Structures are given as structure tokens and as C-alpha cells.
Image (tube, rainbow, N blue to C red):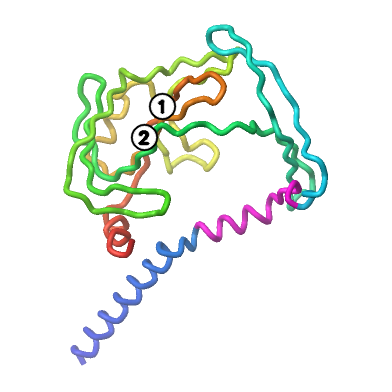
Amino acid sequence: MRKKKIITIIVAAVCVLAGVFFIVRFDVVGRINDTIGHYIFQDKTEVEEEGPEELRYETEVDKDGNEFVVEYRKQIFTDLITGEEVEIWEDTAEKTIIYNNTYEGRIEKIEDNKIYFMVDFEVKEDPYTVENVKDYQVVFDIDTYDFESDPSSHYWGDSLKYLNEDQDIWGNFVYFNSADELEFLVGEYLSVQAFMNEDYYTGDRYKSLFFQPSSPIKSFILSLFF
């Protein structure tokens, strides 16, 4: 009887691990969200491919007062819940990605406006891989971040933010202006994305450091199969 119980527990554990792998490997949750998003908003520009593309041009200024012209493309979406059309003007120029790095691990300490992060896993987005690496330290110097924006120009400041899962879905990003404000995250297991983009028109560069809770168990399972 006891042997049968042990076998049952082992089989159940294997099934759970297989289920977790299936969900993670094939991004089941992501696919469900994508499907829901597709039914909530349908991009009518795909349906109306035969029609002419509608563009408009606006003159903007950079942080030094120099003028430049931005090209916008009209996008029309249909909210399939309300049936109403939503009009969006999208900048046709793509930002240049200078770097985009994602790590998982823990903040060891915060000192002199620097965040010392011990990397446990490296995450690559395209193609998606999670690599279990030999632990090493990355230092984020927040003194190099400029959080000042200019609402009257095309210039946006850098950002330091944390995904607060305790808040509602629309207000879950908390923004900070110094490393010391993240002391509450020291020792927590986190995912951090550090990236820099370059503006197509002005050449201005924008940095972002984005922390969110993570799980070492999930990351370990992913590292086994990717």
C-alpha cells in the first residue's frame, strides 16, 4: 500500500512538471492573452490593405529648440466589445536599440546610488532562451540616468521602475529617481531589463531599468529545455 502511494506521488509530480514545462515552453498563457487581445481589438488596417495608407506630418522640436518633421501612420482599431472604432497615429520611424539585456538574480546591495545585481540567469528574447550562468555581478550606476523630461519637445527622460503586482493592472508601474528608493528589493529574486534606445530624429538616447518579481524555480526549468 505504501509503495503504491509513493508511485502515485511520483507520477503526480512528473505530471505537474510536464504541465509546467508545457505551459512555459509553448507560452500557453501568452497565447491566451494574445487571443483575447485579438478579439478585443481588431486592426482594420490589415482588413483594408487595398486602401491607400494615410499619413500625416507634424513639426516638432528637440530639447535644443531645433525643428524636425515626424511622419505618422493612421491605424484604426475596432473594439469588439463596444464596437467602436479607435484611431491611433503611429510614428513610422523605428527607434534604434543600442542594447537590451535581461537578467535574473538578486540585488546584493545599494550603495552610492549604484545597484549591485548578482546575475543567476541570463535571458535572451529573440530567440527566447534562459541560460543558467556562473554567477557574476552587474552594477547599474543611477547617476548616469537623467530623469528630466521636456514636455514641450520630443525629449523624454530615462526611467527606473518596478512592477508592483499588488496594484491594479493599469497602475502597477512604480517610478523612482534614485537607487536608495529600491532598498526594499535588496535580497529579493528579480528579473531586470536594462535597455537603451536612440531616437530616430534627434539622436537622443534613453535608458530604462525595469525590475519585476521572478522565480528561480521557473528560470531553472526554462534553462533545462531552451
- Residue 105, percent from left and from top: 25, 44
First in sequence, mark 1 or 2: give its number: 2
Mark 2 crowd level (few <14, some 14–19, many ≥20, 10 Å Cα): some
Question: In what element is the residue under mark 1?
Answer: strand
| 37 drawn magenta | yes
- Residue 25, percent from left and from top: 41, 64
Amino acid type at mark 2: Ala
In the rendered structure, the answer to whether residue 54 lies left or right of residue 134 reads right
Please tell me the numbered disc located at residue 27: none
Residue at 29% in and 62% down: 221
**Contact, CB < 8 Å: mark 1 with mark 2?**
yes
In the rendered structure, the answer to whether residue 207 lies left or right of residue 47 reads left
Amino acid type at mark 1: Lys
Mark 1 crowd level (few <14, some 14–19, many ≥20, 10 Å Cα): many
In the rendered structure, the answer to whether residue 70 lies left or right of residue 109 reads right
What separation in Å lies between label 1 and label 2 (alpha carbons)?
7 Å
- Residue 140, percent from left and from top: 28, 28
| 108 drawn magenta | no
- The image quarter containing residue 200 is top right
In this picture, is 128 found above or below 51? below
Residue at 58% in and 7% down: 65
- The residue nearer to you, when weighing 172 against 70, is 70
* Residue of label 2: 194
* Residue of label 1: 207
The span shown in magenta is: 30-46
In the rendered structure, the answer to whether residue 46 lies left or right of residue 113 reads right
- The residue nearer to you, when weighing 75 against 95, is 95
- Residue 99, percent from left and from top: 38, 34
Check the image and name the residue furthest to the right.
Answer: 51
